[in-house]
Amino acid sequence: MFDILIEKDKELLTFLNSLGSEQWDSFWLAITNQFYWTPLFLFVFYLVIKSFGWKKGTFTILALILLVAFSDQFVNLIKNSTERLRPNNDLEINGLLRTLKNPQSYSFISGHATTSTFFSV
């Protein structure tokens, strides 16, 4: 049963990856770069301070930073426990994928999704 799920996951990834085009590559590389999100984070911090005042705002910002740090460490714990290869390192499908970056870390669970969820909550 689990093997069928993994196979379907690989088929879906290969299909979705084939939909990409080179003209959008630079956009997706930029949007996933954390540095470019700095203005948004600073704006959110500004809104928090403006809405809650310095004391409650600072506490809220510190809580956000703590949650993001916790989520990052939680992701690393899960990734290092499951050790699921990233698709670009999976010999079965890596030749079928367009690869823009070649990370060597593990893929499960998504650090971007986890951190974004913690930050949003």
Image (cartoon, rainbow, N blue to C red):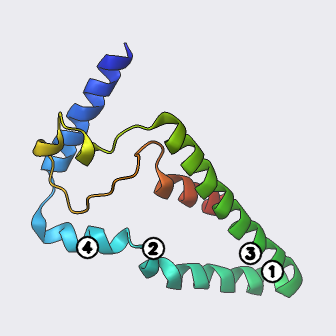
Q: Is residue 10 above or below residue 97?
A: above
Say what amino acid the circle numbered 3 marks: Ile
- Residue found at x 56% / y 49%: 75
Q: Where, quadrant-wise, is the C terminus in this rendering?
A: bottom right
Position in image of residue 63 (x %, y %): 77, 67
Lower position in the chain sequence, tag 4 or tag 3: 4
The amino acid marked with disc number 1 is Thr
Earlier-in-chain disc, 1 versus 2:
2
Q: Are marks 3 and 1 in contact (CB under 8 Å)?
A: yes
* Residue drawn at x 44%, y 38% as measured from the top left: 83
Residue wearing tag 4 = 27
| Quarter of the image where the N terminus is located | top left
Q: Which residue is mark 3?
A: 61
The local secondary structure at tag 1 comes to helix
Q: CA distance from mark 4 to mark 1?
A: 33 Å
Query: Pointers 1 and 2 in contact (CB under 8 A)?
Result: no
Residue 109 % position (x, y): 48, 44
User: CA–CA distance between discs 4 and 3?
Assistant: 29 Å
Q: Is residue 121 left or right of residue 55?
A: left
Q: Which mark is residue 112?
A: none
Q: What amino acid is at disc 2? A: Gln
Q: Residues within 10 Å of mark 1 (few under 14, many from 20)?
A: some
* Element on which disc 4 rests: helix
Distance (Cα) linking label 1 and label 2: 22 Å
Where residue 98 sits, quadrant-wise, is: bottom left
Task: Say which mark, if any, is on residue 58.
Answer: 1
